[in-house]
């Protein structure tokens, strides 16, 4: 809903603040309405609403372009259907917000990480995930395994929405939060204090290095690799998938394979980041209809060369 009822900083302050306050009020009213339904009904209503409205927004071109990169074999009608379902998943996530405690209580957790150090929580971890299913369930699963975790996130542009969302998440998830801007140092400090960190690594990093993602170069964060090499913490992939309305499963996977001991640092970062993208790309490929991909993921010249812009 950001910038739905307001424009940028060049707008008159009173108009901007009024629009921002109205946006927050609309979201609060929507949550109040969804809270009167069961979690399953609210999820279905949000899914139905956004699957109709989302494709009509300007963001639809990014969703279709991203899905064309993920599923190049799919014809246009199939990509339209995937996009519609992806928008529906976004709507379900928003509508499920008042029911997060119930979703956490009912969350199915599949732990495929049998590393004794992980199971016994002997050291903090660097958890990496993609924006799939309900993105808040990854944090819930990590907490359920007994890990104290700080989550990296991008603050909303609307300060009223930001406070509204963060207040609720803090109360429900019981995690710390680190803003994405200048996040490396706070993440390092958290790991050294014994706290784990979690971040979604499927988004574009403007000006970052490129690494293969689903067969095409994509600017990717190297922060997880750098942190792993600096602290010795393992990088643990996490995937959340939607099974049905208000039914979700989060899977904790084995840690990424560490680089060879004699590997130079730059090569080690490359080794870990390529491995991370391979895993994250597989997650997205498995559930493209649940990927919250409303911003362009790959470099614009590359996507233009494929006729996507």
Image: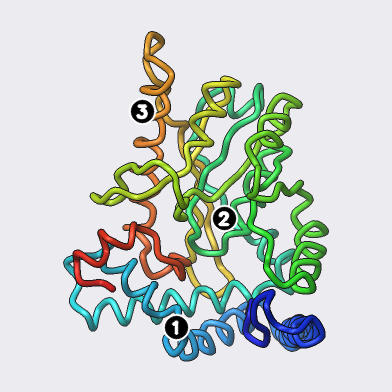
Q: Quadrant of residue 44?
A: bottom right
Give how far across and how far down residue 65 sits, in percent.
31, 71
Q: Which residue is mark 3?
A: 271
Residue 14 visible in this rendered orientation of the protein: yes
Task: Identify the residue at image location x=70%, y=66%.
Answer: 100
Q: Position of residue 181 (x, y in %)?
A: 65, 49
- Is 16 situated above or below 154? below
Viewer-closest of 87 and 43: 87
Query: Which mark is first along the chain, 1 or 2?
Result: 1
Residue 281: x and y in percent read: 35, 50
Please indicate whether residue 111 sits to the left or right of residue 67 in the image.
right
Closer-to-camera residue (5/65): 5
31 left or right, relative to 268 = right
Question: Mark 1 vs mark 3: which is more N-terminal?
Answer: 1
Q: Is residue 15 left or right of residue 229?
A: right
* Element assignment for label 3: helix
Q: CA distance from mark 1 to mark 3?
A: 37 Å
The dot on residue 58 is: 1
Disc 1 element: loop
Q: Answer yes or no: is residue 95 visible.
A: no
Query: Badge 2, how many Cα within 10 Å: few under 14, some, many 20+?
Result: some
Specify the quadrant of the image occupied by residue 2.
Answer: bottom right
Residue at the location (77% across, 62% down)?
Answer: 166
* Pointers 2 and 1 in contact (C-beta within 8 Å): no
Q: Earlier in the sequence, mark 3 or mark 2?
A: 2
Q: Which mark is residue 108?
A: 2
Give above or below for 66 relative to 258: below
Q: Residues within 10 Å of mark 3 (few under 14, many from 20)?
A: some
Q: Residues within 10 Å of mark 1 (few under 14, many from 20)?
A: few
| The N terminus, quarter of image | bottom right
Residue at (58% x, 25% y) in the render: 233
Which residue does the image show at 52% across and 57% down from the upper left? Answer: 249
């Amino acid at each position: 809903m950001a910038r739905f009822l307001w424009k940028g900083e060049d707008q008159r302050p009173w108009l901007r603040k009024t629009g921002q306050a109205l946006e927050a009020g609309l979201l609060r009213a929507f949550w109040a309405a969804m809270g009167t339904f069961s979690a399953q009904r609210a999820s279905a209503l949000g899914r139905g609403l956004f699957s109709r409205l989302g494709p009509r927004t300007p963001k639809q071109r990014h969703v279709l372009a991203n899905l064309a990169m993920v599923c190049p074999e799919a014809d246009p009608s199939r990509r339209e259907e995937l996009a519609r379902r992806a928008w529906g998943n976004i709507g379900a996530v928003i509508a499920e917000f008042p029911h997060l405690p119930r979703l956490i209580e009912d969350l199915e957790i599949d732990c495929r990480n049998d590393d004794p150090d992980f199971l016994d929580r002997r050291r903090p971890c660097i958890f990496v995930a993609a924006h799939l299913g309900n993105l808040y369930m990854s944090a819930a699963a990590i907490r359920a395994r007994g890990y104290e975790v700080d989550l990296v996130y991008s603050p909303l542009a609307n300060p009223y929405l930001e406070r509204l969302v963060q207040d609720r998440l803090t109360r429900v998830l019981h995690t710390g939060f680190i803003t994405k801007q200048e996040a490396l140092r706070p993440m390092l400090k958290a790991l050294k204090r014994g706290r784990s960190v979690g971040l979604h690594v499927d988004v574009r990093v403007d000006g970052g290095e490129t690494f293969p993602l689903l067969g095409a170069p994509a600017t990717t964060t190297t922060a997880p690799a750098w942190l792993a090499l600096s602290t010795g913490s393992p990088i643990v992939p996490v995937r959340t998938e939607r099974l049905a309305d208000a039914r979700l499963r989060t899977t904790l996977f084995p840690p990424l394979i560490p680089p060879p001991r004699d590997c130079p640092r730059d090569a080690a970062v490359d080794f870990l980041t390529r491995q991370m993208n391979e895993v994250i790309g597989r997650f997205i490929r498995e559930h493209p209809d649940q990927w919250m991909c409303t911003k362009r993921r790959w470099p614009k010249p590359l996507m233009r060369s494929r006729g996507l812009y």
